[in-house]
Amino acid sequence: MYKKIGVLHAHHTNVSYIEDCFQRYLIELVHFVDPGMIIKKNKEKALEQLEWMASCQFDAIIITCTEYVALLEDIELQFDIPIIKIDEPLFELICDDDQPKVLLFTNPNTVEGTMKRLEKYAHRNQKKLNCRSVIIEDTFNLILKGRTEDYHKEILAFLYEADLSGSIFVAQLSMMNAAKLYQNETAKIIGNPLDTLVRFTAQSLTLQRKSSS
């Protein structure tokens, strides 16, 4: 049985990530992209957008932008359908043990909000948190200018050159391509929000897989 999911993005490049990772499931994805939201940082407008999406008879809504999620952090979201925030399944993985971890960002504007939410998650679930944030400087502006390949190259170069102790995770969906390429080339695991999002969504919504025939 098909599920219908609304997906809220702040950048159009995230659409293909979501489409690709959910293609094996019986779902219909309806995408909404509003890059202006992270610039204006208007909580009331963001809430209105979610309320409108919630009226569209979706089975769930996924928010893929960490800035969107942080923007809505102080607002009580009360809807009749699940609101799935992209980073919360990743938080669960990061808090799975108390070994050192590094959470990489390219967008400096989302670091504080995400780390505060991670700390709240750990405290709420009585988990020990041993994670520090690292920003890959002067890269996020590349993707905003449409220089996607340059953006991925900068992240990949950082992963090869940086001396980071502990398990590594990328915080943003836009970092996925570089992280996956690095992982394929080195066999070193890079945690990411997409894999955890798919597992969580499939389990919580009991998504059915498409027939392989």
Image: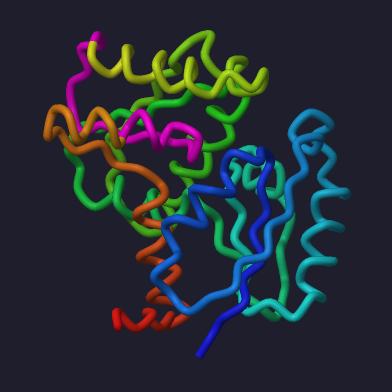
- The quadrant in which the C terminus is found is bottom left
Viewer-proximal residue among 30 and 130: 30
| Among the 4 quarters of the image, the one containing residue 40 | top right
Q: Residue furthest left?
A: 187
- Looking at the image, which residue is at 80% across and 50% down? 46
- Looking at the image, which residue is at 44% across and 15% down? 136
Residue 169 is one of the magenta-drawn residues: yes
| Among the 4 quarters of the image, the one containing residue 207 | bottom left
Viewer-proximal residue among 43 and 21: 21
- Looking at the image, which residue is at 34% across and 56% down? 126
- Looking at the image, which residue is at 18% across and 28% down? 166
Residue 89 is one of the magenta-drawn residues: no
Q: Compared to 19, does 97 lie above or below?
A: above
Task: Determine whether, in the image, residue 46 is placed left or right of residue 212.
Answer: right
Q: x%, y% of residue 15?
A: 59, 49
Task: Determine whether, in the image, residue 123 is placed left or right of residue 157.
Answer: right
Q: x%, y% of residue 106?
A: 50, 22
Q: Compared to 12, does 142 lie above or below?
A: above
Q: Residue furthest bottom?
A: 1
Q: Which residues are magenta?
A: 161-179
